[in-house]
């Protein structure tokens, strides 16, 4: 699986493009503020054709450019009031997009409609895009109790070697974050 990521905008939110391989169809995840140039560059460099946009949550740093591609935009209805474009309602499901199976899980806490997206790669690995639910060495802000339950119930059960692609900052793994969170209220 091809994963291309870059940070954009004042808040340096991560935008990702996911595809089975170069020269194929792709999914754009979290095209936020000032992401258009980075998306266009990645599409050209890897000969990708976008087919859909997935949004982890409705904050502008993750969703502002979502409507600029003329593609279906998938967003949980809990965040629909944050994104002033027409979207497809996203619930817990598995989406088949661009030749990839994307498992969408509702993880409220940062926002009411926060989602994470988990994919199993063709090479045997696992990737989870967490938006602002979990970062390398921390969790997002928001409703602490709800966020803690989302992390505990949806993320921490994943295998240690699952690669975490967060909404800001560097990639990490579930194993590293489980170790970090072991002394935190989130892990209890």
Image (cartoon, grey):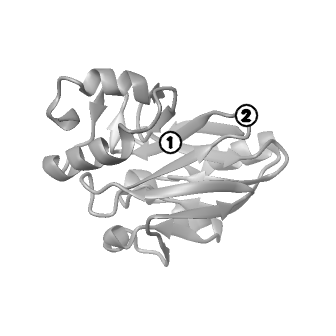
Label 2–label 1 contact, CB within 8 A: no
* Between marks 2 and 1 in the image, the one whose residue lies nearer the viewer: 2
Q: Quadrant of residue 133?
A: top left
Q: Quadrant of residue 42?
A: top right
Task: Indicate the quadrant containing the C terminus: top left, top right, bottom left or bottom right.
Answer: top left
Q: Along the horizontal axis of the image, is 181 left or right of 72?
A: left
**8, 151: nearer the viewer:** 151
Depicted 11 relative to depicted 72: above or below: above
**39, 53: nearer the viewer:** 53
| Numbered label attached to residue 123 | 2
Q: Quadrant of residue 83?
A: bottom left
Task: Indicate the quadrant containing the N terminus: top left, top right, bottom left or bottom right.
Answer: top right
Q: What crowding class fits label 1: few (fewer than 14 Cα within 10 Å), some (14-19), or many (20 or more)?
A: many
Residue at the image position 58 percent from the left and 37 percent from the top: 126
Residue at the image position 39 percent from the left and 21 percent from the top: 176
Q: Along the horizontal axis of the image, is 138 left or right of 24?
A: left
Q: What crowding class fits label 2: few (fewer than 14 Cα within 10 Å), some (14-19), or many (20 or more)?
A: few
Q: Along the horizontal axis of the image, is 124 left or right of 184?
A: right
Secondary structure of the residue carrying tag 1 is: strand
Q: x%, y% of residue 46?
A: 79, 41
- For residue 70, say whether it is visible: yes
Secondary structure of the residue carrying tag 2 is: loop
Q: x%, y% of residue 35?
A: 54, 49
Q: Pointer 1: what residue?
A: 128
């Amino acid at each position: 699986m091809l994963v291309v990521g870059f940070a954009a905008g004042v808040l340096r939110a991560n935008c990702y493009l996911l595809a089975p391989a170069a020269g194929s169809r792709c999914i754009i995840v979290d095209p936020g503020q000032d992401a258009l140039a980075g998306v266009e560059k990645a599409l050209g460099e890897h000969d990708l054709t976008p087919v859909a946009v997935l949004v982890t949550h409705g904050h502008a740093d993750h969703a502002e450019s979502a409507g600029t591609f003329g593609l279906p935009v998938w967003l949980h209805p809990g965040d629909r009031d944050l994104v002033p474009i027409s979207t497809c309602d996203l619930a817990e499901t598995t989406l088949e997009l661009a030749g990839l199976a994307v498992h969408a899980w509702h993880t409220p806490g940062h926002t009411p409609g926060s989602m994470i997206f988990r994919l199993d790669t063709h090479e045997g690995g696992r990737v989870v895009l967490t938006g602002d639910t979990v970062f390398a060495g921390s969790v997002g802000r928001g409703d602490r109790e709800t966020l803690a339950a989302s992390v505990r119930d949806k993320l921490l059960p994943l295998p240690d070697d699952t690669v975490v692609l967060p909404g800001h900052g560097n990639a990490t793994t579930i194993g590293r974050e489980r170790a970090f969170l072991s002394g935190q209220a989130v892990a209890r």
